Amino acid sequence: MGNTIQKKKQDDEDTFTCEICLETQTLPSKKFKNSDRCVHSFCTDCMITYIQVKIEDNVSNIKCPHKSCKYSLEPLSCRPKIEQKLFNKWCDTLCESSVSGVDGVYCPNKECLELILNECGDRNAKRCVCPACKKPFCLTCKVSWHAGYTCEESGETRDQNDVTFGVVCESKGWKRCPNCMHCIELLYGCNMVQCRCGIGFCYECGKQASDFKLFFSTHYRCCQT
């Protein structure tokens, strides 16, 4: 008789009514626990749906759904109850909210997509190397690094071969003619060079010259080797 009363008392303690769906639950495993932060009664199914809706709305700090509760849900305690994909998205949302005051960009490499933060706050920075995939990209237009091309130039004129050659030019220190943009390599001699298009310019600073002798005399310091 005593065992029967004790079992009935235990069953009454395990029974609860979900405050969302208002259904009575009899299994203890159905009750959602917020890492002992609060003791409001919600069933696990309703809480999973609640968390999913909040994450889809990009809410990172998810509060307990009880109207008067001031506590937030603890992500790690929710992890065993929700899908891994949903948990990962919650973590990404938390990360993005924590760095919302810092300029950031996603790596344009489709196989990477790493979030990169401009922690130094240098708004003049242009070329950046992704710390994850090690590939360079442009911070201004957020595409793969386009050495020798401006951000304003159309994608049609900036095919992969041009981009690859531009990276080689940049690594070798070759310069482009300011008139025709042909790439020129200086092997020896002074910095005053003449492109095949007929335009002369300073290989050091890129200044264009109309008169070789006059330009060399007034631009001697820059042009000497």
Image (cartoon, rainbow, N blue to C red):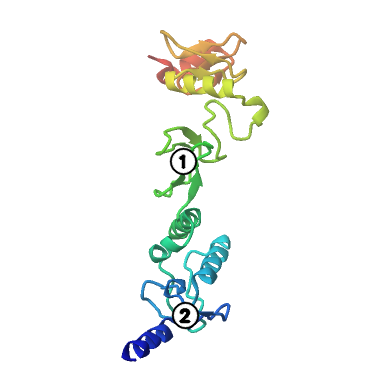
Relative to 106, residue 80 above or below: below
Q: Which mark is residue 125?
A: 1
Relative to 52, residue 40 above or below: below
Q: Nearer the viewer, residue 205 or 111?
A: 111
Rendering coords of residue 134 (x, y %) = 42, 33
Looking at the rendered structure, the kind of residue marked 2 is: Ser
Read off the residue under disc 2. 41
Residue for point 58% across, 77% down: 21
Rendering coords of residue 215 (x, y %) = 51, 16
Real-space Cα distance between discs 2 and 1? 52 Å
Residue for point 54% across, 25% down: 148
Quadrant where the C terminus sits is top left
Q: Could you say whether the residue bearing mark 1 is in a helix, strand or loop?
A: loop
Residue for point 62% across, 24% down: 159
Q: Nearer the viewer, mark 2 or mark 1?
A: 2
Q: Are marks 2 and 1 in contact (CB under 8 Å)?
A: no
User: Label 1: few (<14), some or many (≥20) within 10 Å?
Assistant: few
Name the side, left or right, on which 157 lies relative to 93. Answer: right
Q: Nearer the viewer, residue 120 or 14?
A: 14
Rendering coords of residue 7 (x, y %) = 37, 85
Q: Nearer the viewer, residue 216 or 160?
A: 160
Quadrant where the N terminus sits is bottom left
Residue for point 45% across, 72% down: 32
User: Label 2: few (<14), some or many (≥20) within 10 Å?
Assistant: some
Which picture quadrant has residue 199? top right
Q: Which mark is residue 195?
A: none
Name which of mark 2 and mark 1 comes first in the sequence. 2
Looking at the rendered structure, the kind of residue marked 1 is: Ala
Residue at far left of view: 2
